[in-house]
Amino acid sequence: MRKEQHHKGWNEIKTNDSWAIFKIMGEFVNGYERLSAIGPCVSIFGSARTQENQKYYELAVSIAKTISEAGYGVITGGGPGIMEAGNRGAHLAGGTSVGLNIDLPFEQHDNPYIDPDKSLDFDYFFVRKVMFVKYSQGFVVMPGGFGTLDELFEAITLIQTNKIEKFPIILVGTDFWKGLFDWVKNTMLEAGNISPHDLDLVKLVDTEDEVLEIIDSFYKGRSLSPNF
């Protein structure tokens, strides 16, 4: 009897896994259809825990506003903290403000600065990541936690392995990021686990003007143009 129950339970799991494929496919189709027409955008990442009165929130607002005034849209994870700041800056500048929200048991909730027709909800992190990479012309990475590091190192890995075309990856806040990348240089590089030119994939800055200069410089002479 136990053996029969075990097989029955396992078959139910396999059936559920099979049906999940259609839900995953649906998230991809919806994302592709809705994001394919947004134009050149830059993704802004960072901690959902950053408060409105903290300096990196204010800086993220300013960066997003500067990017939007230059004609680029802004994509965030759609939640609070740095994500809210990014959408807020885009909203203040009258630019494209996109939110790719994820269903989480804590921290995550929609912020009010996303364009009503550009708010997407995801159940699967990996589908959401594909959307960030496919529809972003650059990553601006503010101080954050594990989720921010996850997005950062996945983008670096995809570019390093030539799975996607190179685009600017800009870390904002040298005081915050310097220790990590000192370790990358002094430990990973010294051990031979990365190549010296891999370090060129990332730029560390502190101001909104530096962010825009890097993005504009990278795309100068290329076919991409802002949303004017």
Image (cartoon, rainbow, N blue to C red):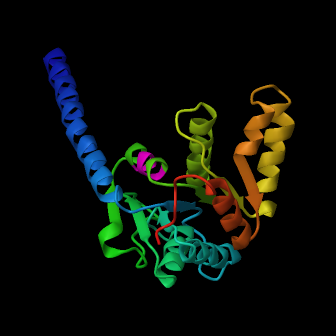
Q: Is residue 42 left or right of residue 101?
A: right
160 over 170 or under it: above or below:
above
Q: Residue at x 42, y 43 (%)?
A: 126
Task: Give residue 183's quadrant in the image.
Answer: top right
User: Would you say residue 131 sits in the magenta stretch?
Assistant: yes
Mainly helix, strand or loop, the magenta region?
helix
47 over 185 or under it: above or below:
below
Q: Nearer the viewer, residue 133 or 123?
A: 133
Image coords of residue 7 (percent x, y):
18, 19
The magenta segment? 128-132
Image coords of residue 25 (percent x, y):
25, 41
The answer to whether one can see residue 152 in this image is yes
182 over 76 or under it: above or below:
above
Q: Is residue 3 left or right of residue 65?
A: left
- Quadrant of the snapshot with the N terminus: top left
Q: Is residue 198 left or right of residue 138?
A: right
63 over 75 or under it: above or below:
below
Q: Is residue 20 left or right of residue 228?
A: left
Q: Residue at x 53, y 61 (%)?
A: 42
Image coords of residue 14 (percent x, y):
21, 26
